Amino acid sequence: MIQMSRSSDSRRDVLTWSRCSNGVMAFMRCIIALVLTTFCVSCWRDPRVVKTLSINEERSILITESSFGDPGRTFQYITRFRGVETPGGVIGFEYYGAPLSFELLTNDAFGLVAVVETNRPTTILIMHDFANGKSWPRDEGRVASELLKRLTNAYPSRHMTLPITPGAIGPGGVH
C-alpha cells in the first residue's frame, strides 16, 4: 500500500513507499527486469542472414544484417569453409528495399572469390581467398591490391574497382 503523508516542514504531499508489501515490490522488480531483458534481446540480437552465396558444397559467403544503433541497414559478411564460419567485415552499398542481388566472380578453382552487387557490377564489395584465408575488407594493407590483381587477371574486360573506404555508404552507392 502507498501511503500519503504531510511533511512537517512544507505543506506539500509526499509519497512514501515505506508500507508497500514485499509482494508488490517483488512484482515491480520482475516487471522492470522483464522490460529491460526484452529491450536488450531485441537490440543485441545476432546478425540476420539475408543472403547465402554458395560457391560449392564446401564454400559459401553469408551476407548478414545488423541494425542495432544504426539508423540505416548495416551489412557484414561471413565466410564459411567446410562448416567453419569466419567473420569478415562491414560491406557497404545502398539498399532501396528491392531484393538483394549479388554476383560471384571466381578465380583459381574457387580459391579466390569476389562479390559484386548486380546493380554495380564493377565495384567489388568482398574478396576472399579460401586457399589462404585472406579477405578484403577485413584484412587491410596489401591484401586488397594482391587479391584485386589476381581477379583482374581472370576478368581483364571487367575494369573492376574497390571502394575508396570499405563499407562507406553515401549518395550514389559505395564510395
Image (cartoon, rainbow, N blue to C red):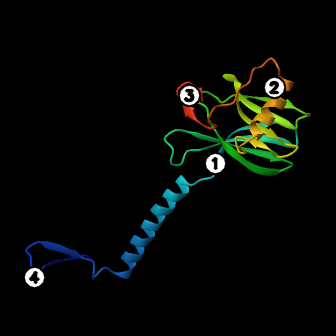
**Residue beneath the point at 55% across and 57% down:** 41
Q: Could you say which is closer to the camera, residue 157 or residue 91?
A: 157
**Residue beneath the point at 39% across and 79% down:** 23
Q: Please, what is the three-letter code of the amino acid marked with disc 2?
A: Thr
Q: Please, what is the three-letter code of the amino acid marked with disc 1?
A: Pro
| Residue carrying label 2 | 152
Q: Could you say which is closer to the camera, residue 78 or residue 38?
A: 78
Of callouts 1 and 4, the N-terminal one: 4
Q: Could you say which is closer to the camera, residue 14 or residue 139?
A: 139
Q: Please, what is the three-letter code of the amino acid marked with disc 3?
A: Tyr
Image vertical order of residue 129 relative to residue 94, above or below: below
Quote the CA–CA distance across marks 1 and 4: 57 Å
Quote the CA–CA distance across marks 1 and 3: 19 Å
In this rendering, would 120 be left or right of 128? left
Q: Which mark is residue 47?
A: 1
Of callouts 4 and 3, the N-terminal one: 4
Q: Which mark is residue 96?
A: 3
**Residue beneath the point at 79% across and 39% down:** 128
The answer to whether mark 4 and mark 2 are in CB contact below 8 A is no
Image quarter hosting the C terminus: top right
Residue 1 at x, y percent in the picture: 27, 77
Quadrant of the rendered image containing residue 164: top right
The answer to whether mark 1 and mark 4 are in CB contact below 8 A is no
Quote the CA–CA distance across marks 4 and 2: 84 Å
| Residue carrying label 4 | 8
